[in-house]
Amino acid sequence: MSRTPSQPREDPPQGRPLLSVRELSVRFLMPGGRPVAAVTDVSFDLRPGECLALVGESGCGKSVLASALLGLLPGNARTRGAALIDTGEGPLDLLTADEATLARTVRGRRAGLIPQSPAAHLTPVRTVRSHLAETVRALRGTPRRELRAAAEAAAARAAFPADHLDRHPHQLSGGLAQRAATALALVADAPLLIADEPTTGLDRDLVDRTVGELRRHADEGHGLLVITHDLAAAERVADRVAVMYAGRVVELAAADAFFGHPGPRHPYAAGLLDALPERSFTPIPGLPPELDALPDGCAFAPRCDRATERCASLPALADGVACHHAREAADA
Amino acid sequence: MLELDRVTAGYDRGVPVVADLSLAVGEGEAVGLLGPSGCGKSTLARVAALLHRPWAGTVRLAGEPVTGFRFRAPRAERTRVGVVFQQPRLAADPRLTLGDLIAEPARATGRGAELADRAARLADDIGLTPALLGRRPHEVSDGQLQRACLARALLLRPGLLICDEMTAMLDASTTAALAAVVEEYRREHGAALLAVGHDRVLLRRWCDRVLDFPTGR
C-alpha cells in the first residue's frame, strides 16, 4: 500500500515509546587522537506503529546511528547519551548494555535490522532456506523437525516466494534479496525494525513494493526506523521525518507537513527537497563539512543563503527545527 | 555521434542480455534510456562505451564502425567516450588519491603535464577541495567519490558521455549537482550524453529524449 502526501494522516500513535533516544553522540577516535563527530546530540522517540524516516546526505551519520542502536559500532567509537529500548520488563539502555545482553535479548528479538545491500549481507554459500532455518532455530528455539515449516512460514511473511527458498544469494534479484533479508529480520517478530537504505539501487516498481511492505509492518504495530537518502521513498513510508546534517538532527517534523504543506522549515531540508528532479532540480551549493572539523556554530551556515552573524552560535533543536532563521509555519 | 545498429550482446553462455537493439544518439544530443533492474541496460551501456563486444550488430562512433581485435577501437576513438558507472567504489582504484584518480586518463594517454591545469580546474568546478583531492577513496563519501569519477570521465573532453545509473547511490542534492556539471560540460563542448537509469522523472528532466528499454525480447 502507499499513501499519497495529499491524504490526511492520522496522528502518530500514542503510548509508551518503543525506543527513546536522548542526546546520543558518537565519536570515532582516529589514529593520532583526532576525533570524528559522526553523531551529535540526537534525540527522538519512536512509538509502536510509527515510522520515522532518517534522511540526509551520505556521510551525515545516519548509518552510524543505526549501528549505535544495535551495538555494532567499531572499537574506536565512543558514545554518550542514552538509547532506551522498551524490553517489556522496563527500559534497557542500548549504549551501555553488554555484548551478551545485546546478543541474547536485543538483536533480532527486540530490534531487527534490514541491512543495506541485502545481497551482500547473506552468506553466499548457503541457501535462503538454510539462512531462515538457522535464524528460526537461534531466535525461537524451534525443534529441528519443525524447522522446515517454520522457515517456510517466515518466508511467506515477507512475501518471499517458496519456490525460490533453495536458491543461493547470487541467484536472487535485488528485490528478492531484499525480501529474504526482511524475512530474516522479522523471524522473532521484533517490535523495532531498523531498515538501512532499503531502496538503494532498486527500480521504481521494487521501491514501491518495498515501501508498501515496510508500511504494512508499521501498520501491524512495529516501530520502524527507516534510514534513507531517497526522499520519495521517505515521503511514502514515514509518519515523521528527521533530517540529519553533519551528525545532528536539524529538523524533526510530521511527514505530511514536511513534504506537503507547509513544507520544510530548515534551509538545508528545503534545499534537499528543492534538489529533487520533480521540483527545481537545483543543488545546494558547496559540500557538507568534514566531521573532524565542524565549525562551532551552525554547520550549514557556509552553504546557507539565510546565514547571518547569529549563525556563529549553535542553534538548538527547538520546536522541531534547529535554525536561527527557520521559516515559521505561518510563513508558508 | 553514437549509433547502435541491431546489437545483440550477452555473456559467456545462455541467452543474450540485449537482443537486436538499435539506438542512435545524435551530435550534442542527450538521450535517456529507462528500464527496470536486470533488463540489460548496463550491458548496453558497456557496449556503447566500447567496453563489451557485442555478439552481433554494429556500433558506429561518429559514423565509423568500431571494429578491431577484441573490439578495441584505436585509442583516439576510445577516448572520445567518457563513462561513469553506478558504484564509484568499484570504479575507483583504492590506492589512488582523488587527485590522481581524476588525472589517471591523462597519464594513461601520456598527456599528464598538458592536462594538469584542466584536471585542477575540473576538480574545482565539480566541488572537490584541495584537501579532498589528497584523500583516497576510503576516506571520502560516495558522493565525493562519484564527483571524482565524473571529473575523470570528462578530463579528455569526450564527445560522448555515458552515465550508467550515475546517481543511483546519491542523495538529491548531489544528484542535482552532478547533473548540473554534466549540463555545463555539454553546453561548453557540445557533447552528447547517453544516461541509463530507472528514474523516469530524473531522466526526463535531464535528457532531450527518453526511451524505454525494449522489453519482451
Image: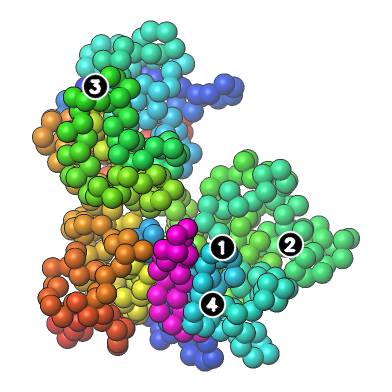
**Residue A106 vertical placement versus A182 (above, below):** below
The quarter of the rendered structure image containing the C terminus of chain A is: bottom left
In the figure, residue A34 lies in which quadrant? bottom left
Query: Mark 2 or mark 4, which is nearer the start of the sequence?
Result: 2
Mark 3 and mark 1: span between their CA atoms?
A: 43 Å
Pointer 3 indicates a residue of which chain? B
Residues indicated by labels 4 and 2 sit on the same polypeptide chain: yes
Residue at x 64% of width, y 61% of height: A183
Pointer 4 indicates a residue of which chain? A
Pointer 1 indicates a residue of which chain? A
Residue contact between numbered discs 1 and 4, judged by CB atoms under 8 Å: no
Residue that badge 1 annotates: A74
Residue at x 13% of width, y 31% of height: B189
Check disc 4 and give the amino acid type.
Gly
Residue that badge 2 annotates: A135
Mark 1 and mark 2: span between their CA atoms?
A: 24 Å
Q: Is residue A192 visible?
A: yes
Mark 2 and mark 3: span between their CA atoms?
A: 56 Å
Q: Helix or strand or loop: what does disc 1 sit on? A: loop
The disc placed on residue B111 is 3
A75 horizontally vs A32: left or right = right
x%, y% of residue A258?
29, 75
**Residue A19 vertical placement versus A196 (above, below):** below
Mark 4 and mark 3: span between their CA atoms?
A: 57 Å
The disc placed on residue A223 is 4
Give the magenta-colored segment's residue range. A18-41
Residues indicated by labels 2 and 3 sit on the same polypeptide chain: no
Check disc 1 and give the amino acid type.
Pro
Query: Local crowd at mark 3 within 10 Å, few (<14), some, or many (≥20)?
Result: some
Check disc 3 and give the amino acid type.
Arg
